[in-house]
Amino acid sequence: MRVSECPGLTRVQEKKLKLAVEGRCELCSEYFALPFLEIHRISRRLYREMVRDPSTRILVVCHLCHHHIHRLPVRVKDQRAIVSRRSFSVRQDIRKVLGYTPKPYFPPYDTDLSQMYDEYFYHFPPGSFRLAG
């Protein structure tokens, strides 16, 4: 019996995560039967922003790729690049399985358009971009 690398995930959640990626290893992009896929937890020592969204902390990979991630090792930066290439629907499905809902965005109340205009042209003066057609 293998020990889960992601404590706190139930077997049902693991199965739903594997179904969210449609049974495909996120590293080698090959299709596998669900029992041959594993959930890999990405180390967050270097990436503090991963605390907010738990879907950025996991990869669904096959047994061989999981072995390579730990033995070679695959850099955290490369693992994060794989996560960033996920489609919107896969990302939403994984967030739903993990029970994550992002905080709603509220625009600032005191918007002064003239100040925004001045700040924009302070950083990007007119003529700094070549207008090509």
Image (cartoon, grey):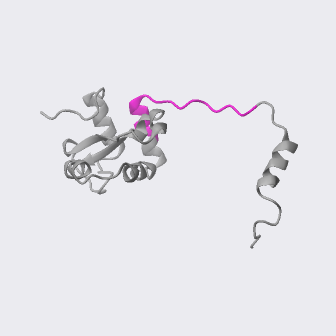
Q: Is residue 122 above or below residue 35?
A: below
Which residue shows up at 77% across the image and 58% down it? 124
Q: Is residue 113 above or below residue 28?
A: above
Looking at the figure, which quarter contains the N terminus? top left
Residue 78: x %, y % from top left: 38, 53
Residue stretch in magenta:
92-108
The one nearer the camera, 66 or 123, is: 123
Quadrant for residue 10, please give it: top left
Which residue shows up at 75% across the image and 70% down it? 130
* Residue that protrudes farthest toward the left in the picture: 1
* Residue that protrudes farthest toward the bottom in the picture: 133
Residue 62: x %, y % from top left: 23, 49
Quadrant for residue 57, please give it: top left
Residue 12: x %, y % from top left: 28, 30
Looking at the figure, which quarter contains the C terminus? bottom right
The one nearer the camera, 46 or 19, is: 46
Residue 69: x %, y % from top left: 26, 50
The one nearer the camera, 121 or 63, is: 121
Is 91 left, or right, of 123 in this rendering? left
Is 121 left, or right, of 44 in this rendering? right
Q: Is residue 106 magenta?
A: yes
Q: Is residue 131 magenta?
A: no
Which residue shows up at 39% across the image and 32% down it? 97
Q: Is residue 66 above or below residue 110?
A: below
Q: Is residue 63 above or below residue 3?
A: below
* Residue that protrudes farthest toward the front in the picture: 46
Which residue shows up at 39% across the image and 39% down it? 45
Q: How many marks?
A: 0
Is 82 left, or right, of 1 in this rendering? right
